[in-house]
Image (cartoon, rainbow, N blue to C red):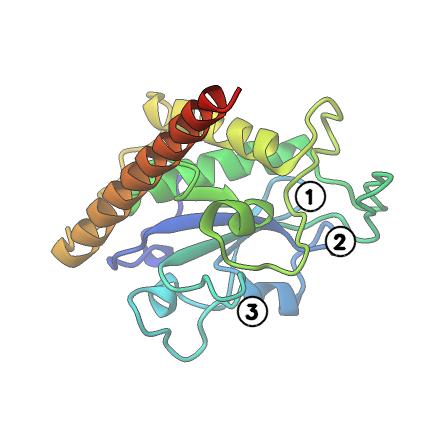
Amino acid sequence: MAIPLEWIPDVPMQRVICHWTAGTHRAGESDRQAYHFLIEGDGRLVRGVPSVAANSGRRLAAGYAAHTLNCNNGSIGVSLCCMEGAQQQPFRAGGYPMTRAQWETMVVVVAELCKRYRIKVTPRTVLSHAEVERVLHIEQKGKWDISRLAFDPSISGAAPCGDRLRREVTAAMASTRLPDIRPVSRDARIEVEQLLERIGEMIGRAIADGIIILIRAIGKRFK
């Protein structure tokens, strides 16, 4: 598969967020308004109405894809058409469960998007809607897509599903079967922002580790 070049304009993007529509196996008009790319039950890729360019930059353009609450700037929305009538606890996939064909197409689509937009695969840059609140700390009002795989009940939870997605996307990007994709032009501002974000993550981890060590030391002192 190769996403048509006219679907992926030369603009800076920072992440890919994956969803399910909570609908049938077909992309309805309201679904196409909400996402940049949709994947139907048989694995067919459908283009959404909004251009990826509308979600690029700090200011959202008219007609942008409003796929993730307060996290649409720089975010590409990819959604699987499935899971209408699904229930989280106890889990039921509903009448239109996610199919393996959809998942496999999504892995290739996300890999192509990452190559095109120079997106490094990390939990902050390739993730599901269900991971946004925990990873990016942006409230999402109980969204649980994608935290279950109907075709593989052994995988349960947002993080395990996200980890599987990132592993498979990384493998697809390294595969010779992925078509040659011309990356977008470099944007120095975006690269600086990404660097600062990575530095912030490292500082945050270092502070957290330091606090843990301090708490342990205090605990030992007062034993």
- Looking at the image, residue 146 sits to the left or right of residue 188; the answer is right
| Residue 53 found in image quarter | bottom left
The percent position of residue 70, horizontal first and vertical second, equals 48, 66
Q: Secondary structure under badge 2?
A: loop
- Earlier in the chain: of badge 2 and badge 3, it is 2
The location of residue 90, given as percent across then percent down, is 87, 39
Direction from residue 99 to residue 33 in the image, left or right: left
In the rendered structure, are the residues bearing label 1 and label 2 in contact, judged by CB atoms less than 8 Å apart?
yes
Q: Which residue is mark 3?
A: 33
Q: Which amino acid type corresponds to the residue marked 3 in the rendered image?
A: Gln
Residue furthest to the front in view is 222
Badge 2 amino acid:
Thr
The tag earlier along the polypeptide, 3 or 1, is 3
How many angstroms separate mark 3 from mark 1 (CA)? 18 Å
Q: Is residue 61 left or right of residue 134?
A: left
The residue at which mark 1 appears reads as 41
Residue at 25% x, 57% y: name it. 12
Instruction: Identify the residue under disc 2.
Output: 24
Q: Position of residue 185 (x, y in %)?
A: 16, 52
**Which quadrant does the N terminus fall into?**
top left
Name which quarter of the figure residue 46 lies in.
bottom right
Q: Which mark is residue 53?
A: none
Does the image show residue 173? Answer: yes
Local crowd size for mark 2, using a 10 Å CA cut-off: few (<14), some (14–19), many (≥20):
many
Q: Residue at x 45, y 41 (%)?
A: 109
Mark 1: secondary structure: loop
- Relative horizontal placement of residue 129, taking residue 135 as reference (left or right): right
